[in-house]
Image (spheres, grey):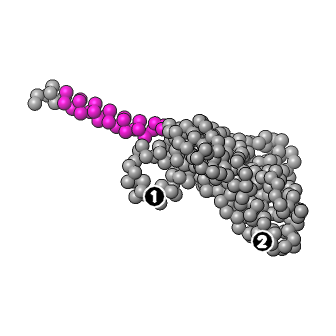
Amino acid sequence: MNSLHKFLFLSIILTFAIFFLSSVSSLCEDDVTVRVTGMGVIVADDVGKARDDAINDALRKAVEQAMGTMISAESIVENSMLIEDNIYSKTQGYVKSFDIVSDGESTNLPNVYEATIDATVSAADIKDDLVALGILMQRKGLPRMMVLIEEQNLSDHHYARQGYDMNTAEQAIQEVFRNKGFLFIDQQTAFKNIQSSSQEAAMRGDASAAATIGKQSGAEVIITGKSISKKANVNANLGGMMSIQANVNIRAIRTDNADIIGTAAEHAPQVHIDEITGGVLAIQKAATKAAERLSSQIVETWSKDLASGMRVAVTFHGVQSFDDLGNLRFIIQDYVRGVKSVDQRTFGGGVAVFDVETTSTAVDIAASLTGKPNDHYDFEVLSVTPNNLEIKAKPK
């Protein structure tokens, strides 16, 4: 084989290799649109809850069917536990969009609601899919964020907040989160009604202080932490420039129950002729990396909330007897959408507290309890946040 033939042969092989790799890449990246039908059981004439269950059932089936176009049925069976933990638990994150083709009570099965949907499913991770992230944000009720970072740019330049003043780390963190579709409150307005001592306590990591600020400002999630930049040892090889090192430690706190839903710590260096400018650039780098990690953790937490259920504390006032506990548990389980489980936490002095695992929010629970008649109680909502509900039970 002469050199020309060798060249042509290798060219053909290379062309086929590129085509094959491109086809595999396209197969992995393409969206899959499927039509599926889900079902939900109608309990206590609650057609709305059955409709939600039918749509969620259809979404899960859509993910399963789309997954079947990428791996064999045998692989699905062999890896059922892994798929259950990592794929089905993130159904909403993999479904980029869906349209309801038809829905209504089944003509063949009694007390069953059916929903047929066309779903567009992506195999991409939800963290890298802004469309899916938008769906997640909507299903979480478009929670609003606030950022409070204590910043120290070099040891002799300590950051102090005077009323309201954006700093380097806060700006970098907000930019990352905004680009992913997160919403932020108007911090300038919010800080007018918040004491500086509460701000400082929150920045030091006090989850209770962050929760208080959230209630005062209307922020459902507060990102707090510290950013520090320092000049490293001077190196003659840098040509008169200096090396600045920055460290950023942040955490995300759910303000209605003070739960920590994510933490991140990052380090970044920067070479510059000016100490302050180098510190700013180093903090920007570290804060951006930390924000990326933290946003991924928040998305993962919210995805699990929607798929597996989140914890909502429901407090009933006016509970007169132990028998009332069973009645209240029954009402929550059968009258409220999205409930996975109901566990009694405390009871005494006429007050009963339940931990409710649900894909709904406390607002949804409140609406269901007050909007549906039952034989035992009238309910009056005393206070409500996305994860906490206080309600007065009035025996009939």
Q: Is residue 5 left or right of residue 60?
A: left
Amino acid carrying label 1: it is Ser
Image quadrant in which you'd find residue 321: bottom right
Q: Nearer the viewer, residue 220 or 326?
A: 326
Foreground of the two, 312 or 202: 312
- Asked whether 118 or 359 is in front, the reply is 118
Residue 121 in the figure: left or right of residue 50: left
Quadrant assignment for the N terminus: top left
Q: Secondary structure at mark 1?
A: helix
Q: Position of residue 345 (x, y in %)?
A: 74, 70
| Mark 2 crowdedness (10 Å alpha carbons): few <14, some 14-19, many ≥20 | few
Identify the residue at horizontal 57%, vertical 39% (top origin).
Answer: 117
The residue pinned by badge 2 equals 346
User: Horizontal placement of 55 versus 259: left or right?
Assistant: left
Alpha carbon of mark 2 to alpha carbon of mark 1: how far? 37 Å
Amino acid type, callout 2: Thr
What element does badge 2 sit on? strand
Residue beneath disc 1: 80
Point out the residue furthest to the top here: 4
Q: How many marks?
A: 2
In percent of the image, x 77 and y 42: which residue is there? 185
2 and 1 marks in contact (CB < 8 Å): no
Whether residue 183 can be seen here:
yes
State the extent of the magenta-drawn residues as a range.
8-32
Is any part of residue 222 visible from this angle? no
- Find residue 7 and report its image quarter: top left
Find out whether residue 388 is within the magenta segment: no
Q: Main secondary structure of the magenta part?
A: helix
The image position of residue 125, as x and y in percent, is: 52, 46
